[in-house]
Image: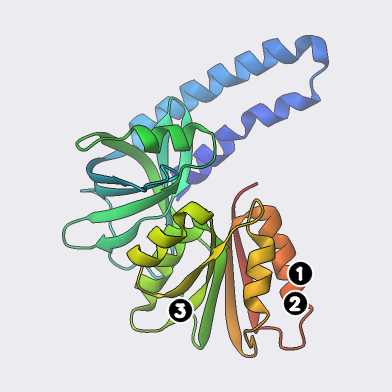
Amino acid sequence: MICRYAVDELIGLSADCRAVDSERFEKTTYRMNIIKQKALSLIENAFGKSGRVLAVRAWESAGFVEIDVHFPEMVMSGWEKVQHAKIKVGEGVYRDYTPAGWDNETHTCTLYVDTMHNGPGSTWASSLQVGDPITYVGVSNTFHKPLSGKMIVLGDMSALGHYLALQQLAAGQSISGAIAVDEEDMAEFESTFRWNVKAVKKNDAGGLASLLQWTQDIDLTNTEVFIAGHIPTGIQLRKELKKRKDQPNSVRVQGFWS
């Protein structure tokens, strides 16, 4: 826990440079990046653990990747909430990914990565091959865990691994919901995942319109709603659901990207 939060703080160091006047901005940013890189290197040397890629499955659209990994030192037993592992995707760059489909005995799991967004995480995931090493510096809880009663999940493809992990934690307890998916991925989604979470066509960044439309025919009385993925969509979706007469018992939002 400590090492993950330390990395979170270090990654945000560059934001402090905004208060510096324009003439000194470039020089200060450079110095802060050097400090961050050295500190992250120290943390990685002290707390870093490694895994190895067992298999990589890229979807036909090339916008989504499933990565099977062996993490020999990752303790998976006792998880009660969905977890995030802080994984190194470049020099001094880390991204949070959810271990899903884990096996306590073999220390294996699958990472589901939405590669439609341009960035170091997408580049890293798209380049992985069987046998490649993976470095991570911590695993910690998210806000989401199974609850009693009817659970409904809503989000975009960046939330897929998150909700697969939630379903695994819920064991035999049913989870239903909708995930906003690009049109070219809808058929593969439906054929790959046999569960009560449906694919709806994504028409905007986070799928807000499609997710709202899906909920119109759903009675939310006495339900527990989970929202994950695009942050602005999650905030707006929560507001809309809270306005309903049949509003759920709770709406729990976990943001991943903006």
Q: Secondary structure at mark 2?
A: helix
Q: Secondary structure at mark 1?
A: helix
Q: Secondary structure at mark 3?
A: strand
Q: Quadrant of residue 160?
A: bottom left
Query: Mark 3 or mark 1, which is nearer the start of the sequence?
Result: 3
Dots 1, 2 in contact, CB < 8 A? yes
Dots 1, 3 in contact, CB < 8 A? no
Query: Does residue 61 lie above or below 79 as drawn?
Result: above
Q: Residues within 10 Å of mark 3 (few under 14, many from 20)?
A: many
Which residue type does callout 3 highlight? Ile
Query: Mark 2 or mark 3, which is nearer the start of the sequence?
Result: 3
According to the image, label 2 marks what residue? 242
Q: CA distance from mark 1 to mark 2?
A: 5 Å
Rendering coords of residue 126 (x, y %): 38, 36
Q: Quadrant of residue 254?
A: bottom right
Which residue type does callout 2 highlight? Lys
Horizontal placement of 100 versus 158: left or right?
A: left
Residue at figure coordinates x 70%, y 69% from the top left: 238
Q: Which mark is residue 239?
A: 1
According to the image, label 3 marks what residue? 175
Which residue type does callout 1 highlight? Lys
